[in-house]
Structures are given as C-alpha cells and as structure tokens.
Image (spheres, grey):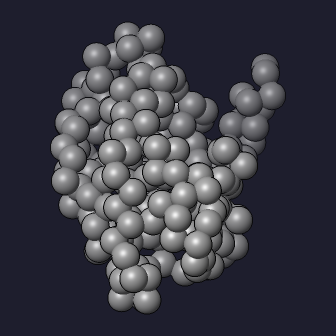
Amino acid sequence: MNPQQQMEQRGQCQWRITVFEEEYFQGKSCEFTMECQNILDREFRKIRSMKVENGPWVGYEYPEFQGQQFVLEKGDYPCYQAWSGNSSYRTEHLLSFRPIKCANHSDSKITLYECEDFQGRKFEMCDDYPSLQGMGWCSKEVPSMKVNSGAWVAYQFPGYRGYQYILERDRRQGEFRNYNEYSTQAHTNQVQSIRRIQH
C-alpha cells in the first residue's frame, strides 16, 4: 500500500472530490485526492457535476490547468451554474482540477497595488470585500497583487461576480506582477471584489 492509500485508509486525506460525467451526479464517476491534469486521460468525456468533500479545489475549463478558473469549496455542484454562479463566463464542463493547498481562511493576507510590478499606492487586506470601491479602492482595476499568506479568489465585478482569478501564496511565490499572471484567460486587470478561499 502506498503512503497516499495509507493516509486515506486512516481518514486523514485533506482533499477529496468526486466528479461525474453528467449533471446531477449521473453517469461515470471517480474520486480524487490529488490533481487531475486531464480528465480525458481517465476515459471521461467531461465533468458536468461534482461533490467536494474535503478541501478547496480549482477547476479549469481545459486540460493542463488552462482556461477559465472556478473555485470549488466544500459542497455539491450538480450543474455548471453551481460553480460558475454569477460569472459572466459560461462553461458547461471542466476538464482539469487541482487542490488549493495553501488556503487558510483564518490567516490570509493580500496586498493590492495601483500599478504593475507592485508600484504605486498599495492596500493590505485580510478580510473579504464584496466591493473594493466601497472599501476605498479608487479604481475598477488592480494591475498587480502580492499574496502574503493563504489563497484568495478575485472577481471581475462587485458582489463576487464575473471572471474568477485564483491567487495563491504557493503559486508564483504569491507574486502577480500584472493581470496576465492572474489566469491563462485574464483579458483585463478589472478586479472589483475579492475574498479568502474557505478551507
């Protein structure tokens, strides 16, 4: 028995997700405790629903962790509306996913910068903000960010809507020097709400 199987047998696995090929937990299914770079390699056509049992995850619309990102916290996701929520971007299936290992809701800190490369006015945050402008950020744009601890999800619009950008301390050393580094599909530096990822 390998170390991962031993941990799972003792019930100590921190990350667990069950994915289904069809909506409403129908069709072929498989349980994962670690990343999956391409569900097609597991002889699935796509993922259309899932149940997150342990840990936060991030799902991607394309293989190899490419395309639009969707944060997946503990709970059931019977169809794409459950993971895309109020997103202005609609994707009806996911093809890759991975755990978010550095999420720590009680110890999360991020710094927003007015300009690229951590230049200009800055603002440190350690709480959730449904409206950055409402808390005093004077722009709809956040050109660069530095994650000091934990993991965050930034949204294009107020109220946690629009494109999602998963920002983690253990990716890129937490440094996102310009909006192109937020996601492989980031087309703008427009960020108007942000929150800590639940673990």
Q: Is residue 122 above or below residue 164?
A: below
Residue 35, percent from left and from top: 57, 31
Q: Is residue 159 left or right of residue 186?
A: left
Disc tally is 0
Of residue 118 and residue 56, the one placed in the foreground of this image is 118
Residue 90, percent from left and from top: 19, 43
Quadrant location of residue 68?
top left
Residue 50, percent from left and from top: 35, 41
Residue 175 visible to an observer of this rendering: yes
Q: Is residue 107 above or below residue 152?
A: below
Residue 118, percent from left and from top: 63, 63
The residue positioned 54% from the left and 37% from the top of the image is 98
Quadrant location of residue 10?
top right
Of residue 67 and residue 14, the one placed in the foreground of this image is 67
The residue positioned 26% from the left and 58% from the top of the image is 162
| Quadrant for the C terminus in the image | bottom right
| Quadrant for the N terminus in the image | top right
Residue 58 visible to an observer of this rendering: no
Quadrant location of residue 22?
top left
The residue positioned 54% from the left and 58% from the top of the image is 116
Q: Is residue 20 left or right of residue 33?
A: left
Of residue 172 and residue 35, the one placed in the foreground of this image is 172
